[in-house]
Image (spheres, helix red, strand yellow):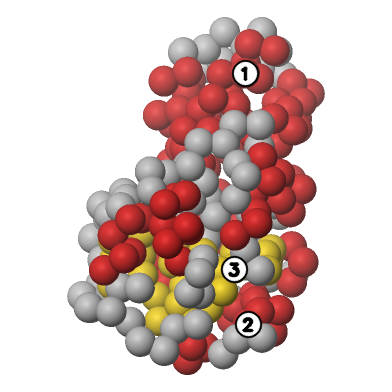
Amino acid sequence: MKINKVDHVFFDLDHTLWDFDKNSALTFEKIFEMNQIDLNLSEFLEIYVPRNLYYWKLYREDKIDKQSLRFKRLDDVFKQLGAKVKTRMIYKLSEDYIAHLSNYNHLFEGTIEILDYLKPNYKLHIITNGFKEVQYGKLNNANIIHYFETVTNSEMVGVKKPNPKIFNHALDQARARPDNSLMIGDNYEADILGALQLGFDAICFNYHKDPLVNGVKYVDNLIDLKRYL
């Protein structure tokens, strides 16, 4: 069913357009080689991925700061694997990870096609909780920044999705209103619920096949957004 009266489409970036898991894995492969860290990458990622999500949730809720997130998500994994990695090296790995992450720019299947489809008829925008120093690098290096009229980053606002302040800031930048805006993202709590509570319409990019609240619009593939827009 088509959604009417939408003029502005806001996208999340990581896990929605930019394939964070694939790019992150390639980054770890690179920095482990650089720093001579001899670990099985698959075993590392099996523990790291859920720990990273856990610490990002704490970060969204302002329960930890950025530096703690970057350190603890690595320290936890090394400890669980029984790997003796010095504190100094963990800090170096956390810095190397940020430095190299935006060098890998795999996008989800259908990203370019759907952006090309939407661009002539809608004003497109980004709202992201990711760190400001890497988000513009991702958009530039993936060659998609030109699709977007505005980019709103949580660090420029001082709060993170689902805080209404970041959505209001994005609306102000875009000169949009909630009733003519649509949010598309993968995270139900941060993207979908945050937007719906402010009066946006919202579509969940549910590539991870998580159970969703009844009535929430969703797609499994980005190109399926054509059903709604």
Where, quadrant-wise, is the N terminus in this rendering?
bottom left
Residue 206 x/y as whole percent: 32, 57
Q: Quadrant of residue 170?
A: bottom right
Q: In the displayed structure, does residue 70 sit left or right of residue 181?
A: right
Q: Is residue 69 above or below residue 190?
A: above
Tag 2: Cα neighbours inside 10 Å, few (<14), some, or many (≥20)?
some
First in residue order: circle 1 vs circle 2: 1
The kind of secondary structure element at disc 1 is: helix
Q: Tell me the residue at 77%/66% (across/down).
A: 156
Q: Position of residue 191 (x, y in %)?
A: 47, 68
N-terminal of the two: label 3 or label 1? 1
- Locate the C terminus by quadrant: bottom left
Vertical arrangement, residue 92 with respect to residue 137, above or below = above
For the residue pair 154 and 137, the one nearer the viewer reads as: 137
Q: Amino acid at mark 1?
A: Lys
Determine whether the residue tagged by mark 3 lies in a helix, strand or loop. strand
Q: Is residue 75 left or right of residue 16?
A: right
Amino acid type indicated by mark 2: Leu
Calculate the distance from the C-alpha at mark 3 to the C-alpha at mark 2.
10 Å
User: What residue is drawn where x is 36% and y is 55%?
Assistant: 222
Q: Residue at x 58, y 24 (%)?
A: 28
Q: In the rendered image, is residue 94 in sight?
A: no
Residue position for label 3: 125
